[in-house]
Amino acid sequence: MSASLICLRQARTFAPRSLPATTRGYAAPSADTGGDPKREIIRRVLYPSNIRNRSTPIGTWRPDVGRALQRAIPSVQAHETIERAWLLHKRHVRQKREAETARKFEAMRKAMDVLHEIDPKLYLEANKKDDPRARSAEEMEKVKTMKAAEIRAMEARIRGLFPRELRIPTDTPSRTGWKYEWKAFDRPI
């Protein structure tokens, strides 16, 4: 037995059996026994007890896992062989993925070369660097007449992406109802 466990054991044997009435248990659980049991059920599910005398229903702890592993993989060499085979498999999958990406990139590069030969103007338009947050003078003038919420919506929107303020379609209607007066910010494309 380690020295710390012996000290702990001795400290327990010499500790007083009952605490005086003047001490206060700040971390003591509340004596809330009545009411809705949902809170207690949720607490038990989220924070299972630390007592490991039986297996958990979701499989987070099993007392027989050591024996099961020993039966399935009896030696360290077998375990290392399986581990190396798994790493080899992952490497092959990664190499296939990288080869596929390289093939797609090469096809895209060839298509861009053909576009450059056919129509240089379209090639330049396709490769133009565009700042998605840049605003035209027309848009800046329109901002002056907008409300704060509309300005925030316009600044949050990035060109070419799905509008953030558009609601996701759901099976049930909104609790607040439909906003009939809402209009999207019309921007020249």
Image (cartoon, rainbow, N blue to C red):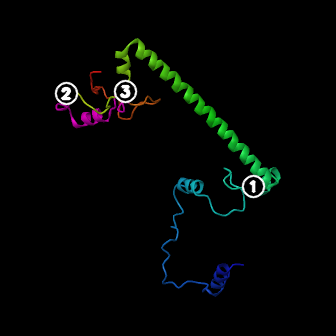
Span of residues in magenta: 138-166
Q: Which mark is residue 65?
A: 1
Quadrant containing the C terminus is top left
Q: CA distance from mark 2 to mark 3?
A: 19 Å
Q: CA distance from mark 2 to mark 1?
A: 68 Å
- Report whether 134 appears left or right of 99: left
Quadrant containing the N terminus is bottom right
- Work out whether residue 50 or residue 20 is closer to the camera in this orientation and state it: 50
- Work out whether residue 186 or residue 54 is closer to the camera in this orientation and state it: 186
Reading the image, the residue beneath label 3 is 160
Q: What's the residue type where badge 1 is placed?
A: Val
Image position, residue 6 (x, y; %): 68, 82
Reading the image, the residue beneath label 2 is 137
- Report whether 117 appears left or right of 9: left
Image position, residue 40 (x, y; %): 56, 57
Q: CA distance from mark 3 to mark 1?
A: 52 Å
The secondary element bearing badge 1 is classed as helix
Image position, residue 111 (x, y; %): 48, 18
Other residues around mark 1 within 10 Å, as few (<14) / some (14–19) / many (≥20): few
Mark nearer the viewer, 2 or 1: 2
Q: Which numbered disc flags the more N-terminal residue, 2 or 3?
A: 2
At horizontal 45% and vertical 15% (from top left) the residue drawn is 114
Position of residue 163 relative to residue 68, above or below, is: above
Mark nearer the viewer, 3 or 1: 3
Position of residue 122 relative to residue 73, above or below, is: above
At horizontal 63% and vertical 61% (from top left) the residue drawn is 49
The quadrant in which residue 142 appears is top left
At horizontal 81% and vertical 50% (from top left) the residue drawn is 72
Dots 3, 1 in contact, CB < 8 A:
no
Q: What's the residue type where badge 3 is placed?
A: Gly
Q: Which numbered disc flags the more N-terminal residue, 2 or 1?
A: 1
